[in-house]
Amino acid sequence: MNSLTLAIRQEAARLLEEKIVDVVIGFEAGTLPLKAQPAFITRKEEAEKLVFNGFCQNNLAAYLTRFPKEKRLGIICRGCESRAVRALVIEHQHDRDKLYLIGVPCTGIIDWRKIERRVGENTLQAREEGDEVIVTTRDGEHRFRRADVLHDSCARCLHPNPVGADIVLGDPLPEGDPERAWAPVLEFEALPPEERYAYFVQETGRCIRCYACREACPMCYCTECFVDHTAPRWTESMITPGGTQAWHIVRAFHQAGRCVSCGACERACPMDIKMTYLVDKLSYDMMQQYGFEVGASDEKQPPFAAFTLDDRNRFVR
Amino acid sequence: MYKILPKADLPRLIEKWMEQATVYAPVRQGDFTKFEPLSDPAQADLYYAANTRYPPKSLFLPQSEVMFRVKGSEFEPTGDEVSSRVVLGIHACDTRALQLLDGVFVDRDYQDPYWARKREQTTLVVLGCANPCETCFCTSVGSGPFDKRGADVMLIDLGNEYVADVRSEKGQVLFDHLPDASQEQIDASRQVQAAAAAKMKKPFETEGLKDKLYNLFESGFWATIQQSCLGCGVCTFLCPTCYCFDIVDEVQRNERVRNWDTCMFRIYSQEASGHNPRPTNTERTRQRIMHKYAYFVDLFNEIGCTGCGRCVRYCPVNLDIRQIIRSAQAWEES
């Protein structure tokens, strides 16, 4: 067991014993070697179930809006989760004083798809050892450099350290390299429009509208999503381009200035659809044009959500 | 009737079929396979061991399907008449699923002509699984990697050739001209089948399961297991036996269409009054499990799950149906 897991268990048990929170949201071992499962711990004895490793692929902040506001939640927060919690608190989705953030600096999530692409679908065991991931399949042992099998969003992560946490377990990590983080956005932007469109068509063409991307996203919490609205209906119902492209475009726009770049949407997608490139561009524009970055402050509203009476544009008055 | 088909001759055979029918087979798309109509026999990828990511139920119940169009005051058929089709390389679990769905779509009081027509026009050349995946559990739900029910032909891989177990007239049409398999080859194919089933783990027992689930209906079990569920449609859309659909009038195009729907979505059970009889994930998760392991058993005396493992592999939060069933069996209400 790694030392972080131990520290998380101790802290979770303490929070429950001292009745600081009603539930601790973390991870427990999964049923598949390359995956962990979200866990909801309400008794201190159960804290022993908690694990923390590179196979914890979900953004736990997605569960925050699923609990009533009076619930006191303890949440294991990596960089992206802590920024999502901040954004959600700014959007009044939970009271900060009802949250206890157990911060954990994060070395990135292992992308099971990258591993299976190399070793096939039948993994029997997987473990991390320092900078390596060791996977056992029916053909034997395979070793990977961690950096080679990180999820793309994690490989270009800017802020691996939690913000605004109540406690931080583990040592802080160096911040990410902005040049590396934004390189894919600039590269994609440099492509001719028809190539960009072709890529968008190709990716959305596989969409089955299961909305796993929406449900896995901490920032998608509308009680009624625009695609679910039936009177009047706002989108084409079929999995034709008119339906799937509209979904991906509007979903991306709703994330402008709100996306925390965790990549949970892509990890959840059963059809391997690339979609972070759309919102990453919007996040880049938010930085460039408004100097805004999600999670950087605990009070600044996202530019597209904020308005003031002295706005220089007349339309908001 | 057992025939022998050297693997080297398969492309030629597919080509021959293509003269008479549209041939579907798993085709590589990035990191997974999907059933597509072949334009060249070489596109067929039968050696990709895992199940296709997208379930072949879509060949019979497309995710989106135009049912008819309205022109003035007249109904117009869609004109998508299905011609003769061969589905090659479908696995036993997915074939079994089609057979279970026949119970829903054609065998009872109502017939679904869209489904029935496609089934009639299709010959299933099933590829048995000599090496089932770690997430497969067909043997736990009353099936197996070489379950021949629903197959027109079952191919058994002997390395350099297939033994073709031809089981229907439709299958005979495709395989009649091939040489008979020798007794030795038939025996070898039986060994392959027995070995494959023996390799599989049994993650749960189904004895008494239905009654146990009914007993748990009002229990705290469902609220406990659903906590991590995100409420997306991955498990049901990729499921070969989930068949729910929603009918929509696309009025701008004068079309009546149907699309896959899923009990895991809130709006699935949302009523026009505003009332939702399955208001939370708890009721919805219960519905999904009960439908497969209790209601389907009541209706058809078969479990409505074929153990393909897609929901296990692709659930974004690793909510594993095998674990759910095990937990249900072990659950003691406190």
Image (cartoon, helix red, strand yellow):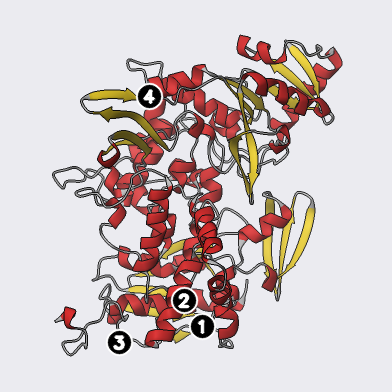
Q: Which disc number belongs to residue B65? A: none
Report in which chain the residue with disc 4 lies.
B
Q: Is residue B114 above or below residue A2?
A: above
Give the mark, 3 or 1, whose residue is nearer the N terminus.
Answer: 1
Which quadrant, please, contains the C terminus of chain A?
bottom left
Q: CA distance from mark 3 to mark 1?
A: 18 Å
- Amino acid type of disc 2? Cys
Q: CA distance from mark 2 to mark 3?
A: 17 Å
Q: CA distance from mark 2 to mark 1?
A: 7 Å
Query: Are the residues flagged by discs 2 and 3 in contact, CB closer than 8 Å?
Result: no
Report in which chain the residue with disc 1 lies.
A
Q: Is residue A263 visible?
A: no
Q: Which residue is mark 3?
A: A299
Q: Secondary structure at mark 3?
A: loop
Instruction: Name the residue at 48% across, 54% down.
Output: A204
Q: Which residue is mark 4?
A: B298
Instruction: Name the residue at 78% across, 14% down.
Output: B178
Query: Are the residues flagged by discs 2 and 1 in contact, CB closer than 8 Å?
Result: yes
Q: CA distance from mark 3 to mark 4?
A: 56 Å
Q: CA distance from mark 2 to mark 4?
A: 47 Å
- Amino acid type of disc 3? Glu
- Amino acid type of disc 1? His
Residues behind callouts 4 and 1 on a single chain: no
Q: Secondary structure at mark 1?
A: loop
Residues behind callouts 2 and 1 on a single chain: yes
Query: Are the residues flagged by discs 3 and 1 in contact, CB closer than 8 Å?
Result: no
- Amino acid type of disc 4? Asp
Q: CA distance from mark 4 to mark 1?
A: 53 Å
Q: Which residue is mark 2?
A: A80
Q: Residue A209, how many percent across, how many down?
A: 41, 49
Q: Which residue is mark 1?
A: A159
